Amino acid sequence: MKLLEGKKTADQIKEEIKEQVAQLTSVGKRPPHLAAVLVGTDGASLTYVGSKVKSCDYVGFESTLLHLDENTTEAELLAHIEKLNQDPTLDGYIVQLPLPKHINEEKILLAIDPTKDVDGFHPANFGRMALEMDAFIPATPFGIIELLERYQIETSGKHCVVVGRSHIVGRPISILMSQKGAAGNATVTLAHSRTKDLIALTLQADIIVMALGIPEFLKADMVKQGAVIIDVGITRVAVATHPKGYVIKGDVAFDEVAPKASYITPVPGGVGPMTIAMLLKNTLLGYLRKA
Ligand code: NDP
């Protein structure tokens, strides 16, 4: 069994981006600029946005955090979005989800200029991605593809079972892995909560991508010997004795599945760090497209 060390790979990608930014600024060009919009004070969102800003600083990007009050109205948020769309010094921005309940997420998503949509959630980008056209690819599936490529894991002709069909992880990774090209050409089965006899599917799989959000759902008896296991899940599980009061668990029962796997991502330190690295990569791509 080999670990797919997302943290190490993400650090490497950040070094590559940092070097490219240093080259750009050394010839008098401005650095890429990423903004994040956060509405309210959700604990997990604050942590995610904080680490995105920190990563921007590390690679030499300019970053802007627009932290808005929980009571910001939908109209006010739309006005902020319009300003970000018009800002010529901004290469990309993200709106941290979830938004407070009184704001329609779909409306906000549709208002984002697709050329600045570095999360790749706008239908224009999602559609372009599905059609194998140049697009911003959502950072988590983009990170999985990058990880598979850098570890030279053969996907062509393999059977990949993706568990979870969300718009941000399961569905896009199922599309990407079935496409022609790097980390693609797999035969993909997309499973979800209505799937019957999931075990029969996962037992056939050469590659399993778990993205459902149920801690330690995938057990050893659901996996064939030598399978590649990608664990996207991140769930905070309360542990009173832990200093933080919780531990992070993935969707895979790591200790029992790892001995059967050929490759496996740990949680934490697997897909999570790759997501942030690919967000930076998307911002750099946005910058370069404009240059
Ligand atoms: P969603 O909650 O949006 O989707 C979960 C999916 O899992 C749904 O498609 C659901 O099916 C399916 N599902 C639920 N229960 C079962 C079951 N018993 N059997 C089979 N399928 C089931 O999740 P997300 O994609 O947003 O997130 C999934 C996990 O990944 C979470 O833990 C999240 O925190 C993590 N995550 C990690 C990221 C990272 O950077 N590493 C980034 C994004 C998410 P149905 O559609 O039928 O309801």
Image (cartoon, rainbow, N blue to C red):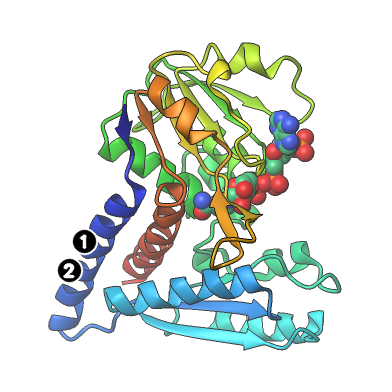
User: Is disc 1 in contact with disc 2, using a CB cutoff of under 8 Å?
Assistant: yes
Q: Please report the residue visible at 48 percent of the width from the left and 27 percent of the height from the top.
A: 256
Tell me the quarter of the picture where residue 199 sits: top right
Residue 242 appears at what percent x and percent y?
Answer: 55, 62
Residue 179 visible in the current orientation: no
Q: From the viewer's perspective, is 290 left or right of 112?
A: left
Give whichever of 79, 261 is nearer the camera: 261
Q: Residues within 10 Å of mark 2 (few under 14, many from 20)?
A: few
The quadrant of the picture showing ligand 1 is: top right
Q: Residue flagged by tag 1: what amino acid is it?
A: Glu
Alpha carbons under labels 1 and 2: distance apart: 5 Å
Q: Please report the residue visible at 29 percent of the width from the left and 76 percent of the height from the top.
A: 58
Give whichever of 115, 11 is nearer the camera: 11
Q: From the viewer's perspective, is 252 left or right of 61?
A: right
Residue 159 appears at what percent x and percent y?
Answer: 48, 17
Residue 174, relative to residue 62: is it above or below? above
Q: Residues within 10 Å of mark 1 (few under 14, many from 20)?
A: some
Q: Which residue is mark 2?
A: 19
Q: Residue flagged by tag 2: what amino acid is it?
A: Glu
The quadrant of the picture occupied by the C terminus is bottom left
Q: Which residue is mark 1?
A: 16
Give whichever of 174, 164 is nearer the camera: 164
User: What secondary structure is found at the residue carrying circle 2?
Assistant: helix
Q: Looking at the image, which residue sits at the far right? A: 102
Residue 32 appears at what percent x and percent y?
Answer: 34, 76
Residue 132 visible in the current orientation: yes
User: What secondary structure is found at the residue carrying circle 1?
Assistant: helix
Give whichever of 259, 84 is nearer the camera: 259
The quadrant of the picture occupied by the N terminus is top left
Tell me the quarter of the picture where residue 169 sits: top right
Q: Please report the residue visible at 19 percent of the width from the left and 81 percent of the height from the top.
A: 25
